[in-house]
Structures are given as C-alpha cells and as structure tokens.
Amino acid sequence: MSRRRIGFWYRLAAVICKPPLLVLFKRDWQGMEHIPVDGGFITAVNHNSYLDPLSYAHYQYNTGRVPRFLAKAGLFKSGFVGMVMRGTGQIPVYRETTDAATAFRAAVTAIEKGECVAFYPEGTLTRDPELWPMQGKTGAARVALLTKAPVIPVAQWGAHEAMPPYAKEKKLRLLPRKTLRVKAGPPVDLSEFYGQEPTAEVLRAVTEKIMAAITAELAGIRGQSAPAEPFDYRKEIARERRAAREAARAAAAAEAAGPALAPAEPTAPAAPAQQARSNPQAQEDEGK
C-alpha cells in the first residue's frame, strides 16, 4: 500500500500524534528496508510499555505502510477514539466470546488485500522481570500459515523509560528526553511449516520461531544477551497459585491445631530501671 492510500483518518491521527512525539522524544529507527514496499504482510512486535503502539505506529507510518492493529473491541464503541479506530481500519478483537475468531478472519482478509497487520504476539505487556519478550500466543502464527505472508519481526525499546509497565502511577517521565528505539528485522523464514496441518505443536513451533526473531532484534538494540528461555507467564501464574494454596493449607492446619501450636505469651518488658542496669553504659551513666 503506497502513501497515497493511507487515507484521511490515518493522516488525521498522524497530524494529532506526531508533533508531540517529535518534540518529546528522540528516535533511533533501524531496519526500515525490511518493510515490504507492496503486498500484504505481518509485523510481530514486542510489548513493554503502554506507549509502544504510538512509538511503533510512528515508525511504520514513516515507511509509507501503515499498520492495522488488532485491538480490544471496546475501543471501537463510542467517542472520538472509536471513530478513529474505525476510520483507520483497525481490527476489533472480541476476547473470550464466540466471535474471537472474527479478528483472525479480518486479519487474513486485510493481508490478502495487500495491507499490513500488526500483532503483539505476547498478548499483553511482558511480565519478564528484565522486559525481554515472553512466550507468545499463536494468533500471528495462525495468520502467517494461512496467508504465507512475510512476517517481519519488530523490536522496541525505550518507551518503558517514559512509562514503565505496571507502574502504580501511569505518569509520563519525560525528562531527561528519552529515545524511542525501533528496529525491523528480515522476514522470518517459515517455509518449513507451509503445507503442514496447523496442530498445536506446529503453531507453537512457528510462534517460538517468530518470538526468537523478535528477541534477537531486541538483543541487538539493547546490546545484551537475551535469556536462554523466554519467560513463561503461565508457569509463573501456576507457581504463584501453588504457593498461595500451600500457604492457605498451612494457615488452616495451624488454626485447626489450636492453642497447642499457638505462640507463647511474650515476656513482659523489664522495668526501666532493670533495663538500665542490664546495659553497662546505662550503669555507668546511672552512677554519675
């Protein structure tokens, strides 16, 4: 899709959003040559700040190939935001409903029309303590196998310094001026999976390959080595739930045991004079 087909609503959003981004942030953009000039494609992007969509959309808008995001259906319902979401052709996701597959059908249709569809494969902000990409979900893999479209891994870094994920107060930390780093890598080679039945194992293998490509690009931006294994949020949740259940069982057992296991009554504190005598320095002071 050329710049001539970006459309009124995307240009309006750019007019509103680009000036503050240009003033408030520095930019380090790399890999734009990997964004296809024409034809449908997928971008798979890591997620570590609420500012990520603005940072990435700014980057990609400047390539001339605007992204269509998969976004929560509630954002489309009313108000100016909903009007912009609909006007810019974003794709509503109806989570935990029978319409959940509709988003993937819409994504496939958009790609077949020659558009770019952007996925955050993690599905949410990363829970990795060091903000590395965690294990991804299989949505991008499903669409990639259905369309055989190029999958471009995109890494972002720096937005979290202005708005950290899961901060108690969602306040912008604009000073000193932060640098938004975005880097696109070469397409992920998924040809070995084409023609295979999209089983859970195949989808997981495709997803892992996509996430590994994103992580490699992020490691280059950060100048650090990535963890050997991605953070598994489901395992972490299971571990926390086991710990909570064990703590609850221990508390219930202690309560059932009654006074036998109750802590002994604390010894009454010594009188002030006794406390003074027990302290050599106090004894010396007392004798003065």
Image (tube, rainbow, N blue to C red):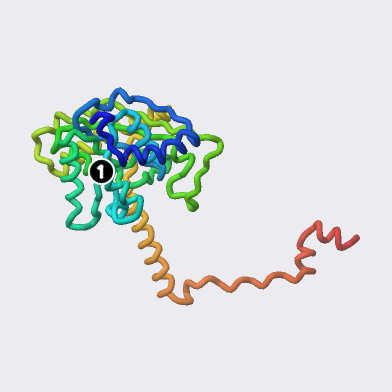
109 displayed left or right of 248:
left
| Residue drawn at 24 percent across, 25 percent down | 37
Which quadrant of the view contains residue 135?
top left
Q: Residues within 10 Å of mark 1 (few under 14, many from 20)?
A: some
Q: What x and y, as percent, mark residue 236? A: 34, 50
Q: Quadrant of the C terminus?
A: bottom right
Which quadrant of the view contains residue 52?
top left
- Element type at marker 1? loop
Seen from the viewer's position, the closer of residues 240 and 139 is 139
> Residue at label 1?
89
Seen from the viewer's position, the closer of residues 151 and 251 is 151
134 displayed left or right of 168:
left
| Residue drawn at 22 percent across, 43 percent down | 138
Q: Is residue 136 visible?
A: no
| Residue drawn at 33 percent across, 33 percent down | 61
Rendered position, 15 above or below 265: above
Which quadrant of the view contains residue 113?
top left
The residue at the far right in this view is 288
59 displayed left or right of 158:
left
